[in-house]
Amino acid sequence: MSNKFFIPCKEANHVCDKTQYKEATLWEKIKLNIHLLYCRACRKYTKNNAKLTKLVTKKPIPLDATSKESLQAAFEKELAKHQQ
């Protein structure tokens, strides 16, 4: 098997995230599944990511306007850090 089938953990986690939002390509999913065969840490990440997504989409979280604004500001701050 050549190296084009093997991806590092960081890329596997990114593909896992993309898969959750139905943005991953078939090829990315194949490489992710190969990676998950031999990487326990990424299998755990994938499992936890799926649990979190299920919890967040299952029940709405009621927030008051102030809490929503605070959460939005914190999100935008973190997003800006990762886009640099």
Image (tube, grey):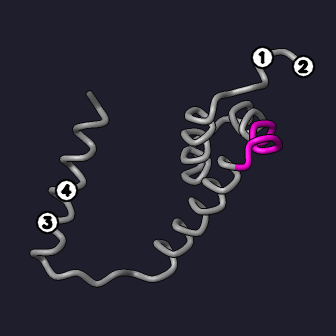
**Closer-to-camera residue (70/19):** 70
Asked whether the residues under the numbered discs 3 and 1 touch, taking CB atoms below 8 Å apart as contact, a structural biologist would say no
Separation (CA) of disc 4 from disc 3 = 6 Å
Q: Amino acid at mark 2?
A: Met
Residue picked out by circle 3: 70
Asked if the stretch drawn in magenta spans residue 56, the answer is no
- Residue 50 x %, y %: 61, 63
Counting residues from the start of the chain, the first of labels 4 and 2 encountered is: 2
The quadrant of the image that shows the N terminus is top right
Separation (CA) of disc 3 from disc 1 = 44 Å
Residue picked out by circle 1: 3
Chain part drawn in magenta: 33-40
Separation (CA) of disc 3 from disc 2 = 49 Å
Counting residues from the start of the chain, the first of labels 3 and 1 encountered is: 1
Above or below: residue 39 compared with residue 28: below
Q: Nearer the viewer, mark 3 or mark 2?
A: 2
Kindly identify the residue that appears in the image at 51 percent across and 79 percent down.
58
Instruction: Give the secondary structure at mark 2.
Output: loop
Residue picked out by circle 4: 74
**In the figure, is residue 23 to the left or right of 26?**
left
